[in-house]
Image (cartoon, helix red, strand yellow):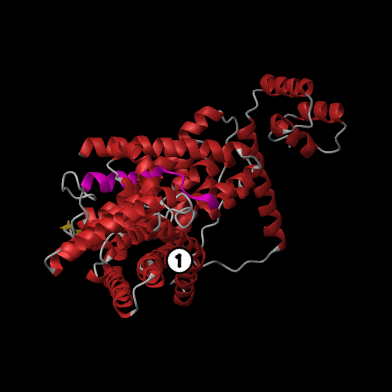
């Protein structure tokens, strides 16, 4: 240790604290400010030793680590006989490009853009089949079964709810398949190393990259993966900003809204919708890094950390492993998220189908009178659709949506979107199934319109304008990009921080930022 710290200082520390080795004295000198077992007087004394000798603890740690590795290497050279290694010039040349401080990031963005292009282009056909299939199933159930509560439940509640889950399986499978492909080739580890350059100035540990990247799948494993970070403040910052990474639960919302408000045009050979999806993922990443920077200023971290990682060799991906990842991730989405979505869809159907008896009976009487006086089948159909919408508005869920409408109207949302905001606090992906259930109840199931067509054709009763125009669509995506709408994540944050303080602060702050960002987006574009 005398190569890093003078022998005189080490002798003083050993004598004062009755230590046996120079290494114990060195550890106490560089980590005393984090040791709760050392008294404040002893900390002042140790700090005086550092100041007198001009010792920088972070530099000393690095020098000691390099010295230790050098000694181990010398021991290995004397005890191990190694054959001459074959240099892999191809890997080195590839790393010089992929890890370049400029071209490395350009290549990474290009890879992401290709992935999102494929997510839209390759998944479009199976998604259309699924969408149309569930629309036909609802129409068939409504026509084939006798009228009644059970038929309405199947056609308007259960089938649209399941459809809101199954329709996104192709895109989720593709997204996780590409991520598994990048990981198996060895490129994802290079991304971790590449992004570490951004982490340090923001107060994040290099190991924060792994939780944040896993946040693209789900915030829950991202929060749990932060356990590998030893510095408490860096770990807390990672936990607080990880939910801003665009997880797979946001993907169904982005997909459905982008498909409605962004034209299906080609720009520079790439679908404009793929650019929009890339923009949402970049927005989440920028928000995560900006949030970490602000928290770093507030928490005032004192000690820097270092990333030590081994680069795996490049290799062809194991296609069986990629396929198993696609299957397992899709299965988790269907059976884990699907349970929540289906349960909420059923509860939503009940709350949307029933309301205060006085209101519902009055509407039934009015509808029966007008239907009896109608002169044609077309007029009867128009009356039925009108009163289906009025009954939805008078239902318990309609009352809830109307109650929050004044607060969300400046964002461009109506009371139906307000209902989806309420239900999606359980899980973000519930938004799509909620809208599917609402518009199945409020309209004619037998017209066989798909979810996307129903949302795209919805108009405001007061102005006749489309509900999901560009301003409203972008505002809604920005809101979901920033809002903390996942009860499971809150529970995990509470467990990891061992307090309700941080999840409450996290929820309030993220919701306020989401509201403000959505407000600015809508008011700018309207």
Q: Position of residue 156 (x, y in %)?
A: 35, 66
Can I make out residue 66 in this image? no
SS state under label 1: helix
Question: Left or right of 125: which side holds 24?
Answer: right
Foreground residue, 132 or 403? 403
Question: Left or right of 516: which side holds 268?
Answer: left
Foreground residue, 486 or 390? 390
In which quadrant will I find the C terminus? top left
> Which residue appears farthest toward the left when viewing the image?
375
Foreground residue, 408 or 100? 408
Foreground residue, 281 or 130? 130
Q: Label 1 neighbourhood size at 10 Å, few (<14), some (14-19), many (20+)? A: many
Q: Position of residue 310 (x, y in %)?
A: 55, 56
Could you tell me which residue is drawn at 51 percent across and 62 percent down? 312
Q: Where is 193 relative to 433, above or below?
A: above
Can I make out residue 210 in this image? yes
Q: Which residues are magenta?
A: 470-488
Could you tell me which residue is drawn at 44 percent across and 76 percent down? 319
Q: Where is 27 relative to 216, above or below?
A: above
Q: Position of residue 182 (x, y in %)?
A: 42, 63
Q: Is residue 144 on the magenta stretch? A: no
Question: Which residue is label 1 attached to?
Answer: 180
Could you tell me which residue is drawn at 28 percent across and 53 percent down? 390
Q: Position of residue 151 (x, y in %)?
A: 37, 72
């Amino acid at each position: 240790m005398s190569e890093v710290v003078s022998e005189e200082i080490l002798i003083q520390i050993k004598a004062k604290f009755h230590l046996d080795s120079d290494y114990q004295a060195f550890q106490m000198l560089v980590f005393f400010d984090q040791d709760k077992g050392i008294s404040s007087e002893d900390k002042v004394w140790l700090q005086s030793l550092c100041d007198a000798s001009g010792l920088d603890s972070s530099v000393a740690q690095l020098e000691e680590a390099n010295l230790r590795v050098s000694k181990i290497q010398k021991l290995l050279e004397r005890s191990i006989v190694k054959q001459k290694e074959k240099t892999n010039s191809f890997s080195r040349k590839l790393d010089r490009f992929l890890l370049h401080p400029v071209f490395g990031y350009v290549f990474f963005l290009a890879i992401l853009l290709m992935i999102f292009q494929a997510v839209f282009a390759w998944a479009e056909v199976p998604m259309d089949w699924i969408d149309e299939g569930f629309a036909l199933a609802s129409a068939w159930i409504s026509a084939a079964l006798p009228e009644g509560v059970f038929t309405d439940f199947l056609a308007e509640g259960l089938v649209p709810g399941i459809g809101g889950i199954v329709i996104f399986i192709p895109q989720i499978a593709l997204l996780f398949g590409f991520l598994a492909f990048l990981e198996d080739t060895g490129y994802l580890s290079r991304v971790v190393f590449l992004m570490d350059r951004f982490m340090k100035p923001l107060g994040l540990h290099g190991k924060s990259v792994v939780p944040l990247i896993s946040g693209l799948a789900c915030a829950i494993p991202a929060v749990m993966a932060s356990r590998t970070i030893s510095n408490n403040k860096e770990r807390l910052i990672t936990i607080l900003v990880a939910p801003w990474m665009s997880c797979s639960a946001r993907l169904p919302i982005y997909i459905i809204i982008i498909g409605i408000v962004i034209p299906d045009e080609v720009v520079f050979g790439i679908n404009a919708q793929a650019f929009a999806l890339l923009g949402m993922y970049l927005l989440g990443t920028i928000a995560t890094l900006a949030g970490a920077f602000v928290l770093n200023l507030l928490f005032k971290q004192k000690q820097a950390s270092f990333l030590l990682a081994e680069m795996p060799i490049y290799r062809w991906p194991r296609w069986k492993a990629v396929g198993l990842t696609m299957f397992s991730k899709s299965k988790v989405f269907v059976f884990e998220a699907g349970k929540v979505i289906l349960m909420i869809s059923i509860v939503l159907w009940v709350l949307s189908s029933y309301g205060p008896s006085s209101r519902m009976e009055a509407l039934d009487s009015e509808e029966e009178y007008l239907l009896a006086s109608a002169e044609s089948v077309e007029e009867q159909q128009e009356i039925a659709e009108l009163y289906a919408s009025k009954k939805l508005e008078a239902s318990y869920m309609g009352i809830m949506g109307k109650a929050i409408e004044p607060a969300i109207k400046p964002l461009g949302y109506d009371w139906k979107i307000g209902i989806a905001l309420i239900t999606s606090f359980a899980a973000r992906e519930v938004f799509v199934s909620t809208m599917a259930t609402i518009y199945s109840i409020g309209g004619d199931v037998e017209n066989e319109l798909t979810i996307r067509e129903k949302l795209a054709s919805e108009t405001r009763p007061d102005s006749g304008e489309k509900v999901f125009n560009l301003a409203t669509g972008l505002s809604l995506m920005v809101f979901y990009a920033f809002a903390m709408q996942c009860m499971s994540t809150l529970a995990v944050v509470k467990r990891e921080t061992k307090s309700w303080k941080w999840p409450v602060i996290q929820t309030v702050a993220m919701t306020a930022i989401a509201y403000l960002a959505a407000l600015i987006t809508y008011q700018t574009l309207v």
